[in-house]
Image (cartoon, grey):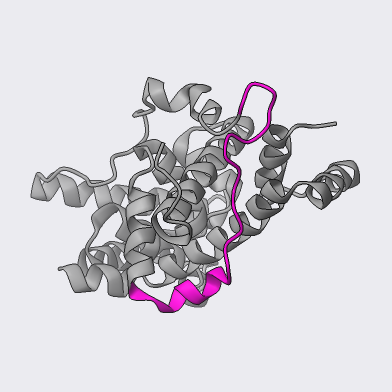
């Protein structure tokens, strides 16, 4: 069994790079039992969304400051 | 007339990414816009120089970097987000992840549940907390994270930009996410939690 440390790293990598079916299965099994890693997984997706929004708003953001 | 293979439309497709890239470095929309204009113009005029070896965007970013460097040279100003080679020893240390996990690989204090996080998008204060947390990342880590998530470069483009191997890239991105997540949790989603 992989630890939370390894599973969370795998979750992170999966955001940038397709994982193979074994890795995806390991994540599924682990997060089914582990609320912390489940939260981590959801929150990394949330942070990606937040960063994209922040990026899209860059112009107004910097515009206001100057 | 040259046999211009790069149409204006094709170049314009990359405008948004180039603009965000320039904005992150220059922190001024007008300057960034100028740099992007100049980049697209010289790309269009010099499209014969595009050998098709690198991707079009990589080539354009290369030109843009020159334009930005020219600007700093002219204004004798310090670039805000300086280029690479600033990998602090501390940033490279394993210790970064050790702060989040115990020796058996379990979370120290694991991510707690966030209730309806996207509701925060509508709150102005959330975005200033987000910005603070993002700025709290060590500089190189912040750069990598922003190139990927804010500017919207692909992972391999970020690696080339920041001089990272694929494996290093994953490690840096993962640490950035761990830190950003922790900061958002402490400062916004679960303020009872103590700062480490």
Image coordinates for residue B152, horizontal then vertical, percent: 51, 59
Residue at screen point 53% across, 38% down: B175
For residue B88, above or below residue B43:
above
Q: Main secondary structure of the magenta part?
A: loop
The answer to whether residue B103 is left or right of residue B192 is right
B115 within the magenta span: yes
Q: Considering depth in this image, is A1 or B162 the residue closer to the camera?
A: A1
Image coordinates for residue B34, horizontal then vertical, percent: 24, 67
Residue at screen point 15% across, 44% down: B73
Q: Considering depth in this image, is B69 or B102 the residue closer to the camera?
A: B102
Q: Quadrant of the N terminus of chain A?
A: top right
Q: Quadrant of residue B1?
A: bottom left
The answer to whether residue B40 is left or right of residue B8 is left
Q: Can residue A45 be seen?
A: yes
Q: Which residues are magenta?
A: B102-124
For residue B20, above or below residue A28:
below
Q: Quadrant of residue B170?
A: top right
Q: Quadrant of the C terminus of chain A?
A: bottom left
The answer to whether residue A64 is left or right of residue B116 is left
């Amino acid at each position: 069994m992989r630890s939370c440390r390894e599973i969370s790293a795998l979750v992170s990598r999966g955001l940038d790079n397709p994982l193979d079916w074994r890795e995806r299965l390991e994540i599924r099994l682990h997060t089914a039992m582990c609320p912390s890693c489940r939260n981590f997984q959801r929150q990394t997706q949330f942070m990606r969304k937040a960063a994209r929004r922040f990026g899209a708003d860059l112009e107004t953001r910097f515009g206001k400051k100057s | 007339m040259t046999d211009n293979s790069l149409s204006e439309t094709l170049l314009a497709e990359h405008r948004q990414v180039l603009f965000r890239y320039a904005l992150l470095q220059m922190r001024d929309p007008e300057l960034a816009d100028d740099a992007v204009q100049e980049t697209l113009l010289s790309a269009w005029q010099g499209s014969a120089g595009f050998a098709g070896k690198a991707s079009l965007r990589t080539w354009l970013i290369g030109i843009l970097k020159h334009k930005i460097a020219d600007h700093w040279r002219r204004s004798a100003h310090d670039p805000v987000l300086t280029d690479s080679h600033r990998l602090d020893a501390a940033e490279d240390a394993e210790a970064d992840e050790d702060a989040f996990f115990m020796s058996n690989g379990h979370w120290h204090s694991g991510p707690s549940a966030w209730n309806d996080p996207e509701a925060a998008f509508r709150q102005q204060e959330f975005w200033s907390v987000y910005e603070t947390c993002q700025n709290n990342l060590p500089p190189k880590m912040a750069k990598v994270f922003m190139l990927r998530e804010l500017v919207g470069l692909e992972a391999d483009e970020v690696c080339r930009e920041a001089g990272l191997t694929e494996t290093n890239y994953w490690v840096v991105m993962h640490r950035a996410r761990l830190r950003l997540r922790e900061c958002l949790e402490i400062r916004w989603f679960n303020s009872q939690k103590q700062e480490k």
